[in-house]
Image: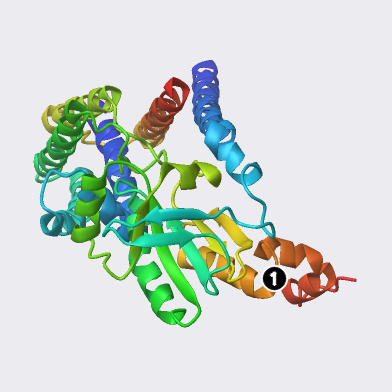
Amino acid sequence: MGGAVCRLALAVIFAQASVHALRDWPTYAAIVENFRIVPPQAARLAARVVPVAELAAAALLLMPAPRIAGPALGLLLMAVFTAAIWINVARGRVNIDCGCGGASGQQLSAALVVRNLVLCALLAATAAAPLPQDLNAALLVGVPGAAAFLVALYFAASQLMANARALAA
Amino acid sequence: MTALIVANVFAWVAIAALSVTVLALARQVGLLHERVAPMGALTMEGGPKAGAAAPSFALTDLSGHKITIGGAGGRTQLVFFLSPTCPVCKKLLPILRSIAADERRTTDVLLASDGEHAEHLEFYTREKLAPFRYVLSAELGMAYRIGRLPYAVVIGPDGTLAARGLVNNREQIESLLLARELGVSSVQEFLSRAPKQDAHERHDDVAVG
């Protein structure tokens, strides 16, 4: 059951990030370029590819087979995001927009790297966890309920991280 | 068994309610930070008022030419405050280009920022900002109490500050120019000056007195 909960929660988080990026694509493209990981032309391409990949990861996470595809794509994306954030934190460029979706105007921090590592751990766990075979009432209520709880926790944590930055300023 | 089900349902409802509460509280704290941020709150209050004479600054732009911001120059100046690391500013650049082209008979669109010359010159070249004049001046930003970006200031041809405000899209930039044409400091002020007309226009389908 834990596997299904994590898959559903992670799918919602990836889908939300994708929708957030696609709704204001010009801003998202500028945010990606701002990370200064790849040249501007490549950044614009990345800004097109990433939201689509996020949406694909969300869809794959919800599919029972191939079991490994969703978590694998998710981990690949998270690895890229976390590396990009870490490089900029190391460069001292912490005042740029994260482009994470959810909390608006969230900036970079080491806490964000930790948050992403937690998401990576959840993704890895879902790859290994078996999916429930028989549906029953407890699962039908429990899985969406617990997933919604995890999603709320994720957004609350992101918002609190953004707040902590404002407090420290 | 029934007691367990009741307890479980209650627990789920409680978890859901508490999750929503924690999330809402965190967001409210975030909004409060935005409102009380030292610069954020002052942007509305501090600095020259619309209708007053705009402070005049004799500056040198990135390419080394002299430029005066403020003062009665005979042309409207739209000063757009930006930074190379502000994503929304970058999004607005093409919109500014089109506004500059549309309004070129009456209006000069200028870009303003502060910081290291080399970094801004690189930004200016990379974003092909040659059609705009670009000035670096910490004093200019401080005079207008710019705390958040992108911010725009419109100075009329007679040197009075026509309108200013935080802008996030084309409509907001155009509303500042429109406010100047209407002779009010903001479109909000225009609407509040003409309450009847406003009520009539906006609530056509409702019988408003």
| Residue at screen point 33% across, 51% down | B87
**Chain for mark 1?**
B
Q: x, y (%) of residue B91?
A: 34, 60
Looking at the picture, does residue B203 appear above or below residue B118? Answer: below
| Residue at screen point 51% across, 28% down | B26
Looking at the picture, does residue B209 appear above or below residue A82? Answer: below
Task: Specify few, some or many for label 1: CA neighbours under 10 Å numbering under 14, 14-19, or 20 or more.
Answer: some
Q: x, y (%) of residue A121?
A: 18, 25
Looking at the picture, does residue B15 appear above or below residue B77? Answer: above
Is B194 left, or right, of B161 in this rendering? right
Is B206 left, or right, of B102 in this rendering? right
Q: Give the residue at mark 1.
A: B183
Question: Which quadrant of the view contains residue B201?
Answer: bottom right
| Residue at screen point 39% across, 79% down | B101
Q: Quadrant of the N terminus of chain A?
A: top left
Q: Nearer the viewer, residue A139 or B77?
A: B77
Amino acid under label 1?
Answer: Gly
Q: Nearer the viewer, residue A160 or B120?
A: B120
Q: Nearer the viewer, residue B43 or B6?
A: B43
Question: Which quadrant of the view contains residue A99?
Answer: top left
